[in-house]
Image (cartoon, helix red, strand yellow):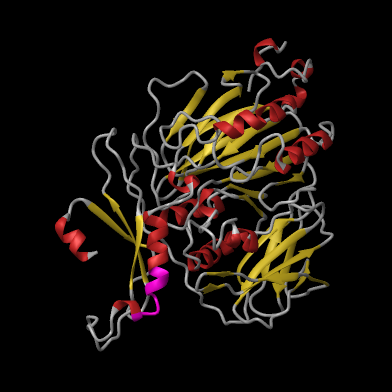
Amino acid sequence: MSSLLQAYPKGFQVTSLTPLQPNFLHIFKIQPRAPRTPSSYYKPPCLFMSFPTSSNHKQLKMENPIWKNPHFFPLLLTCTFFLFPLQPSLSAGLQDDYIRQPPRKVVVAPHLRSKSDPQQVHASLAGKEYMRISWVTDEKDVASKVEYGKVSGKYEAMAVGNHTSYHYFFYSSGKIHHVKIGPLEPATTYYYRCGGHGPEFSFKTPPQTFPIEFVVVGDLGQTEWTASTLSHVDSKDYDVFLLPGDLSYADTQQPLWDSFGRLVEPYASRRPWMVTEGNHEIETFPIIYPHGFKAYNARWLMPYQESGSTSNLYYSFDAAGSHIIMLGSYTDFDEDSAQYKWLESDLRKVDRKKTPWVIALLHAPWYNTNLAHKGEGESMRKAMEDLLYRARVDVVFAGHVHAYERFTRIYNNKADPCGPVYITIGDGGNREGLALMFENPTPEVSVYREPSFGHGRLRVVDESRAHWSWHRNNDSDPFVADEVWLQSLTTTKSCWHNTANTDGSKSKVNKVEL
């Protein structure tokens, strides 16, 4: 690596993904510096590991050849994987016609508790009146139980769950606990302790009726920008955190999953975090790990069984008159797939009189005027857009593109007052930087777009109105750069005529305000 940087000192950028310290396996990302011309090709990064060295030997001697180092073969496998990517979903997003702004440094959260104490604690909704508490312990003998109650230090109830663990090459996870607790009262603060050890945590359950506020953050990662985004999110109360894919950006480096869990714990342990997968969760490896999502499924268990799904990669849940659908961009979605059939059934069950708002989240956007990841969600759009349109889904959130963009209501690539509002919000704080290049001129269906880091808030006021705002990250305070009032399609009577008609051009509707 040093010879490469000496030969081209201005041509490459090196980012450390792990803290630099003696006798430690260091992981670096090496990539060409961003070109000055938008049309220049921006090559994908690769990872480089430096081996731990003895404090008494600054250089490896010939009598101790490199291939005898215990880290040599993991390094060889990892570099082979990143230098010659075999899965299109990870490499297809690197276009030849856009560049990214340099990211901020990766933040690695240390493990400061004992082996029996819980770490990486996070909560998620698990069916009506229930929550799931998930955490990790290094000690294998810790019980998978949660004690909880409405008064700090007084635990009137206890629930027992299950646990899992996994191996990924030479990495072995801790004991991953999942415990479902309840029934719980709405809009109530509960105090809880995991496994009978360690600190006390608390969370607040969502309200049963309007208003309810969702925070939406995509492509979160674990950088200084991530910390800034989470700080801004935490500056104002909310009820549910929605994340449309790309969580830790571990990309097969499993210790980064642990670091991510510790980084988000102060937030994810206090409000339910509902997530779906992105391309950075795939983590496949030919022959050895062909199916992917090993770490994601083990660590972030979502209520897929409670919603009738057969896969943790797609599910739905209800919260205060809102039905939230989390779709999987990286599992089968054609008409013959299990996901398509589940979505069709799930939408059919929604009673819009009781649940006037329907919101969908996925990773790869169906509509996108940024040059990054252009067209990557098109096949899924063609397969599933009719289902969402006929069901009169109100809003569709996506990530993947590292910028913010809000569209008007759309169906079949045209403005349609009965289609969903599409919003791309892949700007949480990832280590890859921002996608700066948009199409020019701006298409009429794109209302607002900006390549900045930030987060969004959807406050559903009642059965007919919701307020959406996008908060740009400034170093000190978030700034509301875009906002709009949305009207639920449930209250738009003209949109419920001929709902079986999938031809937007023939749909007999009248234009309404968003």
Q: Nearer the viewer, residue 209 or 175?
A: 175
Residue 372: image location, x then y, percent: 42, 36
Q: Residue at x 70, y 73 (%)?
A: 194
Exactly how many numbered labels are in the figure? 0
Q: Residue furthest front?
A: 287
Which picture quadrant has residue 108?
A: bottom left
Please state, as top left, top right, bottom left or bottom right, where the N terminus lies in the image: bottom left
Q: Which x, y percent locates residue 199?
A: 64, 75
Tell which residue pokes out farthest to the bottom in this image. 56
Q: Main secondary structure of the magenta part?
A: helix
Magenta stretch, residue numbers: 68-75
Specify whether residue 461 is in view: no
Horizontal and vertical percent for residue 39?
28, 33
- State the quadrant of the C terminus: top right
Q: Nearer the viewer, residue 134 or 197?
A: 134
Q: Residue at x 39, y 49 (%)?
A: 432
Splitting the image into 4 quarters, where does residue 172 fall? bottom right
Q: Is residue 415 visible?
A: yes
Residue 147's quadrant in the figure?
bottom right
Residue sitting nearer the eye, 417 or 291? 291
Apparent side of residue 91 relative to residue 120 in the rendered image (left or right)? left
Measured from the top left, where is residue 171 in percent x and y? 52, 72
276 within the magenta span: no
